[in-house]
Image (spheres, rainbow, N blue to C red):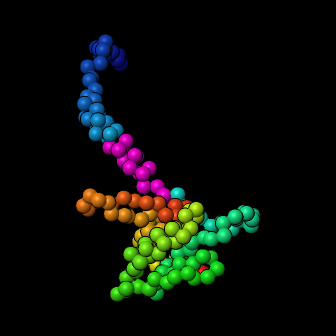
């Protein structure tokens, strides 16, 4: 039986066109979005000193260190060895205004000290840690212009740990 040969015509060039307009539209939107979010994510980073289990002794020339201990009953401020002040809860909420006033008074008494520790008891919500850290780091002072405040640094080097 004889086989028939089929001759197919081959085209010299492809007639296909790739439409890249949708891809370019995606890139026009995606690239600025990624650049903007990358800048904002760098602004919100806060550096913390976490306690380590290393036994290396570091010489400390500071004689005073602020420790803010957040407990279920209220907030305690100590110097590492004894309690300086206690801020009890007001109507089952932490009194952050009184804490801020005490932090300003401590900064005025020890202007060269920049280190502080925020210690939390177990089962205290994470939101309170953030609020206490903000109060220990900075204070808002009203300016001459209505409804405007300036931020002043208090204790900027913050360590976080578990309350004793």
Residue 157 shows in this picture: yes
Q: Does 114 sit left or right of 44 as displayed? A: right
Determine the residue positioned at 57% across, 72% down.
66
Determine the residue positioned at 31% across, 12% down.
12
In the rendered image, the quadrant that contains the C terminus is bottom right
Determine the residue positioned at 57% across, 82% down.
83
Determine the residue positioned at 52% across, 71% down.
106
Looking at the image, is 9 positioned above or below residue 20? above
Looking at the image, is 83 positioned above or below residue 41? below
Name the spot of residue 113 as percent of width and height, x first: 58, 64
Looking at the image, is 106 positioned above or below residue 6? below
| Rendered image quadrant of residue 140 | bottom left
| Rendered image quadrant of residue 28 | top left
Q: Does residue 42 belong to the magenta stretch?
A: yes
Q: Does 57 sit left or right of 46 as displayed? A: right
Name the spot of residue 161 as percent of width and height, x first: 57, 72
Q: Does 55 sit left or right of 140 as displayed? A: right
Q: Identify the magenta region.
A: 33-46
Nearest the eye: 37 or 130: 130
Which residue is situated farthest in the right direction here? 56
Q: Main structural element of the magenta stretch: helix, strand or loop?
A: helix
Residue 7 shows in this picture: no
């Amino acid at each position: 039986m004889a086989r028939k040969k089929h001759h197919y015509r081959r085209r010299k060039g492809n007639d296909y066109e790739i439409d890249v307009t949708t891809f370019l539209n995606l890139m026009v939107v995606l690239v600025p979005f990624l650049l903007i979010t990358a800048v904002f994510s760098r602004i919100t980073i806060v550096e913390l000193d976490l306690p380590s289990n290393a036994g290396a002794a570091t010489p400390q020339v500071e004689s005073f260190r602020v420790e803010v201990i957040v407990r279920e009953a209220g907030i305690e401020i100590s110097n590492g060895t004894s309690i300086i002040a206690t801020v009890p809860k007001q109507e089952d909420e932490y009194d952050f205004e009184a804490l801020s006033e005490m932090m300003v008074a401590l900064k005025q008494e020890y202007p060269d000290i920049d280190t502080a520790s925020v210690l939390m008891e177990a089962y205290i919500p994470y939101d309170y840690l953030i609020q206490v850290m903000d109060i220990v780091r900075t204070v808002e002072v009203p300016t001459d212009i209505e409804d405007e405040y300036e931020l002043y640094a208090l204790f900027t080097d913050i360590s976080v740990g578990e309350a004793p």
